[in-house]
Image (cartoon, coloured by chain):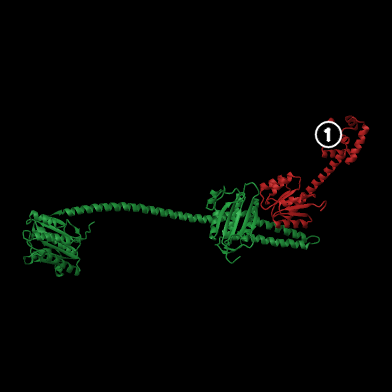
Chain colours: A red, B green
């Protein structure tokens, strides 16, 4: 497996099924953590590494479907794969609508579970990567001075140095210095890249952009 | 009613009972002879000894001739001494002397002799020739005495009087001392009755009518009662048949209901080990086909396969045992084991209702003798009820199953839920068939449970749980010296 070690969290109250899945995952080199109930899993704490949940729908105490709803409300964004002994269409539709990766009926083919886990983990890795990029950008944005942010907003909105100088009531050479600082601090190699970063940060000035047209 | 069993041979009288004492007034000689011929003919035909005390206007020879003409086998009767023709004067007045006592005993001796010879009784006739004689008063007294003493004896007597010789006073005397008074005038009969007889007859008729009326009424009542009884009987038989049918239906439906509830459990209970087996076998294949095969992991997975296969087959065994409608098989039952098995069987249902079961089982309980399956049926019914009692109730559904012992060395098992509970009114009827607090319940689970518990010599009762819900507890007698 490539990238950071991903964990598969298996929640099933039947120890036989739990251990079988655990063995299967280990045999393909997946890191698996096994839980007998939702409560056990929750008390473990929020995982830092990418991963996914393999969840029995009809768990005692709190059902898998209810738990899925709860996960969506909290900051835990783990992709969910449902396994069930006797699922019905209604249940699977509800699970898939709520964002489940897969809805497998017991007994399932090992490859189906492994494929679903693969997809789920890739999705989580992508999600985590995107999250990491956004967090980095946010940190850089926060390192900019107030004047630099004003300049960046105008640059990404397509204003010329001259226009920006006029907007802010400063001389054009000062605008150029700020602009160089913004490019360096944000780590942008081109204006186009800076525009994309601004998009992600959602910091472009709608008002000023409109002036272009 | 008067028992009429002797044919008199006298047309207007017909059949009369023994003891009948008749007097007849005749006008002509033929009237007398015709009557007597019929009278004796009837007697001879019916195995009676006949005695005719003859006097004027008839002679013994004339009497015999008349009878011979009228009765076909007369000679044989004479030869058999079935008939005797006496001269009346000699019989009644030997030596011109009237002795009432002697005449009466004479008749009695003749009766005894007749009975001894196999005759059924004595039929006599005498012609009262002496109306104008000095013995008339004595004779009248004799007739009265005869009338009294012969009642009920096998005698029939016909006394004949000449109308021509009789004075009005004589007729009155005669009529008074006989039960029946007849007159025959030139072949025509006339019948007189004594006032006593008339009264008696009326009385008897009245009584008879009353009796018949009562019999009719009573019969009608009896018929009605009988009809009612028959109807009730039929109704009872119908009810019994219905009851029997309902009871067998009850058992069957209860079993089916349990099985229906089980169906989901069965699917789940088989599916779980099956899933584990499939996944384990695939995992072990992967362990074995790795670049460096991991035999330890593969072995572990294979061991789990064996365990799960056994678990699946145990489930099938239990289900088969439950489905088989065997007769009760009594043996030692470890109740805690039985409880564990039922919980295992019902895991599907419990999961579906997200019900958590808390077991508070005391170790080293007294053993009980019983039918394990039946006791498990009880547990299953109680758990099913508990699960259903908590649907739609706020809070986590939880069932607490306790086992323990009582002072009597018996076993106590209770199933407690956190449902709405039942009020005291309903609790009284909880164990009756078809009583249910559930919208879609059939009201049989607890009834069946009670039947089984009581068949095991135990008791079952319901009480409110704290803070809410219901506890159903049953006791079973323990086995002495076995634990």
**In the rendered image, which quarter is residue B412 located in?**
bottom right
Which sits in the foreground, B120 or B331? B331
Query: What is the residue that sits farthest to the front in this orientation?
Result: B407
Q: Is A132 placed left or right of A16 in the picture?
A: right
Q: Is B122 placed left or right of B291 in the picture?
A: left
Query: What is the residue that sits farthest to the right in this orientation?
Result: A173
Marked residue chain, label 1? A
**In the rendered image, which quarter is residue B76 located in?**
bottom left
User: Where is residue A43 drawn, in percent x and y?
Assistant: 74, 51
Q: Report helix, strand or loop for mark 1.
A: loop
User: Where is residue A204 drawn, in percent x and y?
Assistant: 83, 35
Q: Quadrant of the C terminus of chain B?
A: bottom right
User: Where is residue B340 drawn, in percent x and y?
Assistant: 64, 59
The residue indicated by pointer 1 is A205
Residue B386 seen in render: yes
Q: Is B111 placed left or right of A152 in the picture?
A: left
Which sits in the foreground, B466 or A23? B466
Residue A188 seen in render: no
Q: Is B381 placed left or right of A31 in the picture?
A: left
Which sits in the foreground, A174 or A157? A174
Q: Residues within 10 Å of mark 1 (few under 14, many from 20)?
A: some
Q: Quadrant of the N terminus of chain B?
A: bottom left
User: Where is residue B453 drawn, in percent x and y?
Assistant: 55, 58
């Amino acid at each position: 497996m490539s990238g950071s070690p991903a964990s598969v969290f298996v929640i099933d109250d039947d120890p036989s099924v739990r251990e079988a899945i655990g063995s299967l995952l280990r045999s393909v080199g997946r890191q698996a953590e096994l839980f007998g109930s939702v409560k056990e899993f929750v008390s473990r704490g929020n995982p830092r590494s990418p991963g996914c949940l393999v969840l029995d729908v009809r768990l005692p105490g709190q059902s898998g479907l209810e738990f899925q709803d709860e996960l969506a409300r909290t900051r835990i964004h783990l992709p969910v794969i449902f396994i069930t002994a006797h699922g019905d269409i209604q249940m699977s539709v509800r699970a898939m609508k709520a964002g489940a990766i897969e809805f497998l009926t017991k007994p399932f083919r090992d490859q189906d579970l492994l494929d679903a886990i693969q997809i789920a983990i890739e999705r989580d890795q992508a999600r985590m990567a995107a999250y990491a990029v956004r967090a980095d950008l946010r940190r850089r944005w926060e390192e900019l001075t107030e004047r630099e942010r004003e300049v960046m907003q105008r640059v990404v909105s397509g204003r010329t140095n001259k226009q920006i100088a006029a907007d802010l009531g400063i001389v054009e050479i000062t605008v150029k210095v700020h602009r160089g600082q913004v490019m360096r601090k944000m780590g942008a190699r081109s204006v186009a890249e800076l525009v994309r970063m601004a998009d992600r940060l959602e910091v472009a000035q709608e008002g000023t952009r409109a002036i272009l047209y | 009613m008067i028992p009429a069993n002797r044919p008199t041979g006298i047309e207007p009288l017909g059949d009369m009972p023994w003891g009948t004492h008749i007097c007849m007034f005749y006008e002509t000689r033929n009237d007398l002879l015709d009557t007597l011929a019929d009278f004796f003919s009837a007697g001879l035909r019916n195995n009676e000894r006949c005695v005719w005390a003859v006097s004027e206007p008839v002679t013994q020879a004339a009497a015999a001739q008349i009878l011979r003409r009228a009765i076909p086998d007369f000679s044989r009767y004479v030869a058999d001494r079935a008939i005797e023709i006496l001269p009346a004067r000699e019989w009644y007045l030997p030596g011109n002397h009237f002795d009432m006592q002697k005449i009466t005993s004479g008749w009695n001796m003749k009766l005894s002799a007749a009975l001894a010879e196999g005759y059924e009784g004595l039929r006599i006739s005498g012609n009262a020739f002496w109306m104008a004689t000095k013995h008339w008063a004595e004779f009248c007294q004799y007739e009265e005495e005869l009338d009294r003493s012969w009642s009920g004896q096998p005698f029939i007597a016909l006394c004949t009087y000449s109308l021509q010789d009789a004075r009005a006073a004589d007729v009155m005397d005669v009529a008074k001392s006989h039960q029946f008074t007849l007159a025959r005038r030139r072949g025509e009969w006339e019948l007189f009755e004594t006032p006593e007889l008339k009264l008696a007859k009326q009385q008897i008729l009245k009584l008879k009518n009353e009796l018949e009326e009562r019999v009719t009424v009573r019969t009608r009542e009896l018929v009605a009662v009988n009809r009612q009884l028959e109807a009730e009987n039929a109704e009872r038989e119908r009810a019994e048949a219905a009851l029997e049918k309902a009871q067998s239906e009850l058992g069957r439906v209860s079993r089916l209901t349990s099985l229906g509830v089980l169906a989901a459990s069965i699917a789940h209970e088989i599916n779980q080990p099956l899933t584990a087996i499939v996944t384990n076998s695939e995992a072990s294949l992967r362990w074995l086909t790795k670049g460096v095969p991991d035999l330890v992991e593969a072995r572990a997975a294979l061991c789990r396969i064996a365990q799960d296969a056994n678990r699946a087959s145990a489930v099938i065994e239990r289900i088969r045992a439950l489905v088989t409608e065997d007769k009760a098989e009594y043996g030692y039952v470890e109740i805690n084991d039985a409880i564990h098995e039922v919980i295992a069987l019902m895991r599907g249902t419990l999961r579906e209702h997200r019900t958590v079961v808390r077991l508070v089982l005391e170790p080293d309980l007294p053993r009980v003798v019983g039918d394990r399956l039946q006791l498990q049926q009880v547990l299953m019914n109680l758990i099913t009820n508990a699960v259903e009692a908590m649907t739609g109730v706020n809070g986590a559904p939880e069932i607490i199953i306790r086992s323990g012992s009582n002072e009597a060395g018996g076993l106590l098992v209770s199933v407690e839920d956190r449902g709405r509970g039942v009020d005291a009114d309903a609790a009284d009827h909880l164990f009756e068939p078809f009583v249910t607090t559930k919208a879609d319940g059939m009201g049989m689970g607890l009834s069946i449970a009670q039947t089984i518990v009581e068949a095991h010599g135990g008791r079952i009762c319901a009480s409110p749980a704290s803070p809410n819900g219901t506890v159903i507890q049953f006791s079973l007698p323990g086995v002495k010296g076995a634990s």
